[in-house]
Image (spheres, rainbow, N blue to C red):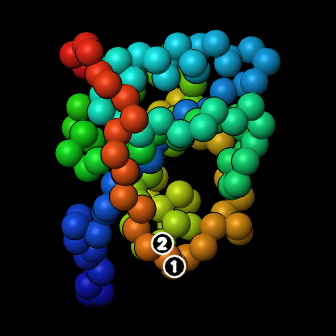
């Protein structure tokens, strides 16, 4: 029997949630979700892109969050994504694997261009939150 290569959870420096939307028909819904996130979670909200950028095939924004928020933020997104597609992936030293193999989807999975993602590099920290939550999750 072959042994499974076990990777330590400590390999995960932080997480990203990419929240996708159709620029014409779902933008206001996506921005309302973004505001609800900012009201409830100490996260770093990235730029809102109204077009595909990087490996992403649809308009989106990124939410960077610390590993300690996973247990509350991800279930909240499951209940509140409102039909939007959301990719949640760890940040390790392999961006390609993080996005393509180790991520999980809420809603409909979308195509990603993994060819442009590097396999090695530094694990990205979530960074200091740029939100000031005032509500409970």
- Residue 33 horizontal side relative to residue 75, left or right: right
Q: Residue at x 37, y 51 (%)?
A: 126
Mark 1: which secondary structure?
loop
> Mark 2 or 1 closer to N-term?
2
Residue 39 image position (x, y, % from top left): 35, 18
Q: Is residue 34 shown to the viewer in this render?
A: yes
How packed mark 2 is, by other alpha carbons closer than 10 Å (few <14, some 14-19, many 20 or more), is some
Q: Is residue 69 above or below residue 97?
A: above
Picture quarter with the N terminus: bottom left
Whether label 2 touches label 1, CB < 8 Å: yes
Q: Which residue is mark 2?
A: 94
- Above/below status of 6 relative to 42: below
From the image, tell me which residue sits under label 1.
Answer: 120
SS type, badge 2: loop
Q: Residues within 10 Å of mark 1 (few under 14, many from 20)?
A: few
Q: Is residue 53 left or right of residue 71?
A: right
Q: Position of residue 35 (x, y in %)?
A: 46, 17
**Residue 76 falls in which quadrant of the image?**
top left
């Amino acid at each position: 029997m072959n042994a499974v290569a076990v990777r330590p959870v400590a390999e995960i420096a932080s997480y990203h949630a990419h929240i996708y939307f159709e620029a014409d028909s779902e933008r206001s819904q996506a921005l309302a979700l973004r505001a609800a996130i900012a009201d409830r979670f100490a996260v770093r909200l990235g730029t809102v892109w109204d077009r595909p950028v990087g490996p992403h095939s649809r308009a989106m924004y990124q939410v960077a969050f610390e590993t300690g928020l996973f247990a509350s933020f991800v279930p909240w997104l499951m209940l509140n994504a409102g039909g939007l597609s959301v990719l949640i992936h760890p940040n390790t030293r392999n961006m390609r694997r993080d996005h393509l193999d180790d991520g999980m989807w809420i809603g409909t999975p979308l195509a990603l261009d993994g060819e442009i993602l590097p396999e090695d590099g530094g694990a990205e920290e979530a960074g200091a939150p740029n939100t000031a939550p005032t509500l409970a999750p």
